[in-house]
Image (cartoon, rainbow, N blue to C red):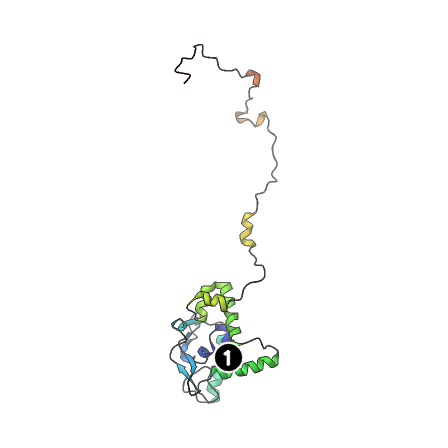
């Protein structure tokens, strides 16, 4: 169960509503179709609602190879156990009925407290998945994975801020100054175009003056 949480980042209610038919383990990559959730009725019992928390909760999620392996093992164990599973749920109760996420949450908190991980909740798994996806594929991908309608919600509540320095040297290396260690040649006559000598200042004569007196029109 925890493998499914961390690999997909789904809500607890969505997890306990997933059926075996929602899986496509032969696809590339394998996927799970999230299309329902478990809610608690006024009577206190749990039932499956035919749609997730919001319309954006309906989504196909790719699942990694390690989760596929765990799911195949779980399906084989279910078949061998002989326990009735009329709803075809991946995670049914011990009697084959719908699991109440609130009851599982209470049990998890007891286990986490005894293990010294009282800060770890089901939301912690969702945040871990969203943060990792956001840092690799961007916040839009993380919002889709979490089933959120607004990226801002994912960024505010599910993506951890980065507090350490990012390795951005692959970008900032572009500002490296050019190599200025090349030898500078002394300027000499042999460096002049065509190899000819430049005339000295004494050899340069001023142009002759105009012998004519300037007219009044020329002075304006």
Please name the residue that numbered disc 1 is placed on: 1
**Image quadrant in which you'd find residue 61:** bottom left
Marks counted in the figure total: 1
Q: Residue at x 48, y 81 (%)?
A: 101
Label 1 crowd (10 A; few <14 / some 14-19 / many >=20): some
Q: Specify whether residue 144 is in view.
A: yes
Image quadrant occupied by the C terminus: top left
Give the x, y percent position of residue 147. 43, 71
Picture layout, residue 14 above or below residue 193: below
Picture layout, residue 63 above or below residue 17: above
Between 35 and 193, the residue placed more toward the observer is 35
Between 35 and 45, the residue placed more toward the observer is 45
Give the x, y percent position of residue 19. 42, 80
Give the x, y percent position of residue 13. 45, 79
Picture layout, residue 201 above or below residue 78: above
Give the side of residue 175 with respect to residue 44, left or right: right
Between 114 and 33, the residue placed more toward the observer is 114
Q: Secondary structure at mark 1?
A: loop
Give the x, y percent position of residue 201. 57, 18
Q: Residue at x 55, y 16 (%)?
A: 203
Q: Residue at x 38, y 72 (%)?
A: 55
Q: Specify whether residue 19 is in view.
A: no
Q: Residue at x 50, y 78 (%)?
A: 70
């Amino acid at each position: 169960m925890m493998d499914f949480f961390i690999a997909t980042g789904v809500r607890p209610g969505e997890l306990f509503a997933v059926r075996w038919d929602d899986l496509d383990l032969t696809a590339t990559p394998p996927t799970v179709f999230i299309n329902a959730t478990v809610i608690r009725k006024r009577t206190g019992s749990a039932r499956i609602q035919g749609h997730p928390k919001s319309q954006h909760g309906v989504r196909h999620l790719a699942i990694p190879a390690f989760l596929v392996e765990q799911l195949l093992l779980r399906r084989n164990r279910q078949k061998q156990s002989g326990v009735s599973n009329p709803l075809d749920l991946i995670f049914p109760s011990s009697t084959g009925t719908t699991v109440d996420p609130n009851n599982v949450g209470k049990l998890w908190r007891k286990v986490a407290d005894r293990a010294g991980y009282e800060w770890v909740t089901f939301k912690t798994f969702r945040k871990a998945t969203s943060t990792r996806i956001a840092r690799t594929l961007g916040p839009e991908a993380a919002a889709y994975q979490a089933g959120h309608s607004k990226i801002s919600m994912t960024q505010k509540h599910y993506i951890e801020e980065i507090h350490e320095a990012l390795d951005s040297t692959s970008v900032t290396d572009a500002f490296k100054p050019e190599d200025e260690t090349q030898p500078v040649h002394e300027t000499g006559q042999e460096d002049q175009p065509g190899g000819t000598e430049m005339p000295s200042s004494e050899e340069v004569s001023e142009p002759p003056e105009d012998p004519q007196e300037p007219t009044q029109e020329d002075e304006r």
